[in-house]
Image (spheres, rainbow, N blue to C red):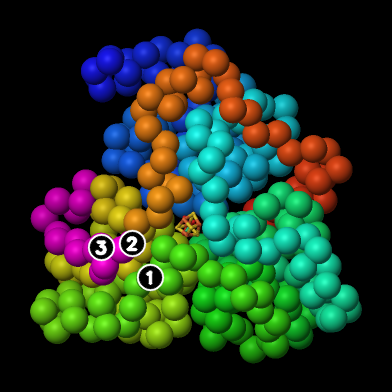
Amino acid sequence: MHADQITQEIRTLLKERNAVLLAHNYMRDEVQEIADITGDSLGLSQEAARTAAAVIVFCGVHFMAESASILSPDKTVLLPRLDAGCPMADMVTVEGLREMKARHPGVPVVTYVNSSAAVKAESDICCTSANAVKVVNSLPDREVIFVPDRNLGQFVAAHSDKTFHFWDGYCPTHERLKPEDVQRLKAEYPDALFICHPECNPAVSALADHVCSTSGMYDFCRTNPATRFIVGTEAGILYRLRQESPRKEFILASPALVCPNMKLTSLEDILEALKRMTPVVKVPEEIRVPAKRALDRMIAIPR
Ligand code: 13P
Ligand code: SF4
């Protein structure tokens, strides 16, 4: 089937099913193009919580669809590719987190949304890359357990006077970006600003002019007078950066910055999901209720 025809069928089915199509900023260009709303993890979870649609088609990875199901239990949440996971989310287990809590009794657990619903259910509060510093600093406690991303954790620790207990998780995609890659590009383009995601290694973040979430990058590049940016996050971000600022130049900091999971979902997968109304992601109530508490506490903190 031709791409235009697939797009047309998706549009028709979205209307028929009273469905909204949410897509993360790393999705393939053609998926971002057809989405009703694109955004970062925080923006998409807020959207999932307030949408009036009966069905949410979540183009992202598994933990994002779980968050939508946690926040909107009465809606049907479709994840067109059930195999789209997040290796960092899989690095922390409920058992492991319980052991860590036992080693630090009474210390609150701050959990990055890149985690399973079951791990969120064991946590006091969630955070995303967009609000992690605010979330941690909102807590009255002097110590925090931070899971699973050690890189985001270290970035937050640098902006907080609390004592951190880190989990040793990381994003394999962002970890592939090396300081040498950035230094080489900075030497080649001395006028360029370097922006990166806090999932990058601290040695990379230390070289950045600005460290922020994916949606934070759009705001920064749109409003900053610079005309050339070296971009340290997943390649999918380039689509909207270039659309929003066609006269500016965006250089991916490394060709290795491609998340295979974020690239799985195709237009065909979306069409199939809408036709068959599957695969559905549904979080069981005994996990959903405590996980929602941790997400709600996060959402209550202004962006
Ligand atoms: P954002 O919350 O910045 O969109 O990032 C999500 C993610 O998976 C980064 O790798
Ligand atoms: Fe997970 Fe990294 Fe892919 Fe984001 S880019 S979904 S953190 S593996």
Q: Is residue 138 above or below residue 235?
A: below
Crowding around mark 3 (Cα neighbors within 10 Å: few <14, some 14 to 19, many 20+) is few
Q: Are marks 2 and 1 in contact (CB under 8 Å)?
A: yes
How far across and how far down the image is residue 91, in percent? 63, 63
The quadrant of the rendering that contains the N terminus is: top left
Q: Which residue lies under the disc numbered 1? A: 176
- At label 1, counting other C-alpha atoms closer than 10 Å, the crowd grade (few under 14, some 14-19, many 20 or more) is some
Above or below 55: residue 194: below
Does the residue at mark 3 contact the one at mark 1 (Cβ under 8 Å)? Answer: no
Residue 186: horizontal and vertical position, in percent?
A: 18, 80
Residue at 39 percent of width and 18 percent of height: 11
Residue 135 in magenta stretch: no
Residue 177: image location, x then y, percent: 35, 72
Give the alpha-carbon distance from disc 2 to disc 1, as whole Å: 7 Å
How packed mark 2 is, by other alpha carbons closer than 10 Å (few <14, some 14-19, many 20 or more), is: many
Count all numbered tags in the image, as a single digit. Answer: 3
As helix, strand or loop, the secondary structure at mark 2 comes to loop
Q: Badge 3 is on which residue?
A: 255
Identify which residue is drawn at 47% across, 52% down.
40
Q: Tell which of 2 and 133 is nearer to you.
A: 2
Q: Residue at 42% of width from left, 36% of height from top?
A: 265
Q: Are marks 2 and 3 in contact (CB under 8 Å)?
A: yes
- Residue 283 vs 88, above or below: the answer is above
With 269 as the anchor, is 117 left or right in this view? right
| Residues rendered magenta in the picture | 242-257
Image coords of residue 75 (percent x, y): 66, 27
Residue 133 in sight from this viewpoint: no
Work out whether mark 2 precedes mark 1 in sequence or the reverse, and give the earlier one: 1
